[in-house]
Amino acid sequence: MAEHLSLPEARRIALAAQGLDRPRPRRAGAGHIRRLIRQLGLLQIDYVNVLAPAHYLVPFSRLGPYPRSLLDDLVYRRREFTEQWAHEASIVPVETWPLLAHRRATHRVRPWGFEKFLEQHPAYVEWVWNQVRTRGPLAADELPEPEGIPRRIPGDAWVGTVPRAVLEALFGRGDLAIADRRPNFARVYHLAERVIPPEHYHRRAVAREEAERRLLRRAARAHGIGTAADLADYYRMPVRDARPRLAELAEAGELRSAKVEGWREPAWLDPKARLPPRIDAAALLAPFDPLIWRRDRAARLFHFDYRIEIFVPQPKRKWGYYVLPFLLGDRLVARADLRADRAAGRLMVVATYLEPDVRRPGAVIAALTAELRTLAGWLGLDSVAVERRGGFEGALAAE
């Protein structure tokens, strides 16, 4: 029989599952980061550096100021986590590597259509792999010009060059892994068997259906409660593949069916999910935060319409380029378009908007002011400057 939950109960379950139900530690260390990533299952990587890359911002929202070098150390030195295609490009625990084997086997290389190049130039692909094997960890710009092949990929701004596209294809298929990042954020590729710890790299392949069950179980733990589409999207699984696996998990007692007030779709509840009596969070959320990256779920949980407008032409943007929702208690109460002016040492609040149903704007302004100052300090910026755009910038600037 399905469990019935009110919308506020569902919100509190979801926030607790995302680690937003507890006070920030006085001083966050590697152990806090380690536990958080395993709780979330993954961090989506995004290097838009308007403030800080998004995968650093997600722990900040939950842990407060922490040394970003600790996250790098866990991934690239201690090898407790690794980069892999999971939601999108993500940081995942190394024990997730065997569960993503079916994803690597069917990886679609980028840019779209580059498979044809790989088929037409197998000797060059093998040469790139051998360069990594013999020379050790390499970034794309350390490979020489390909002979008889144009280096640039016309019309592609993300991958850019043929050497990088080949390295990315080999990474996506699991032949290579990411050994490090350069100061300019460029990936450094190495043989996967020399990056992934042996106990995970050589682990017997997990059958696809079992891998899907385990991934969905992790998605359910990170959601607390969610629809089939919510849980499937966490690891980019087709919903048609997820539904039978979810039914199997329910049959085994690892999920419970639920109905949430106002949701048209039935939900799945993690049996171990916590329902706190209240949430006292105050946090700015990165555009790629897992709590809000699925627009439909953000609308259902918070009545909050959120769209990342990075790729929207400036005249068509409604809110701004890099807009962070502000969580206060268990509600998303405001949004702020932010930018780090590193040359001037200022956190620029380009625009601020209060949600229409907020009843205590003064409390929102006080909490948001404190969070902006904390964020500025973590980013190494000396001050916060509020520009005159949005709904309540005057009061925020005064504060």
Image (cartoon, rainbow, N blue to C red):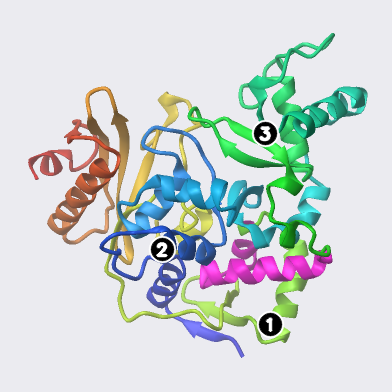
Q: Which mark is residue 32?
A: 2
Q: Is residue 293 left or right of residue 151?
A: left
Q: Nearer the viewer, residue 257 or 324?
A: 324
3D distance between C-alphas at marks 1 and 2? 31 Å
* Mark 3 or mark 2, earlier in chain: 2
Q: Is residue 201 left or right of residue 282?
A: right
Instruction: Using the rendered image of the protein, determine whether residue 57 is visible from the camera's viewpoint.
Output: yes
Q: Amino acid at mark 2?
A: His
Residue 202 sits above or below residue 158 on the image: below
SS assignment for the magenta stretch, majority: helix
Tell me the residue at 84%/66% (across/down): 207
Mark toward the viewer: 3 or 2: 3
Name the element at disc 3: loop
* Mark 1 or mark 2, earlier in chain: 2
Read off the magenta span. 206-233
Name the element at disc 2: helix
3D distance between C-alphas at marks 3 and 2? 29 Å
Residue holding disc 3: 137
Residue holding disc 1: 250
Which residue is situated farthest in the top direction here? 148
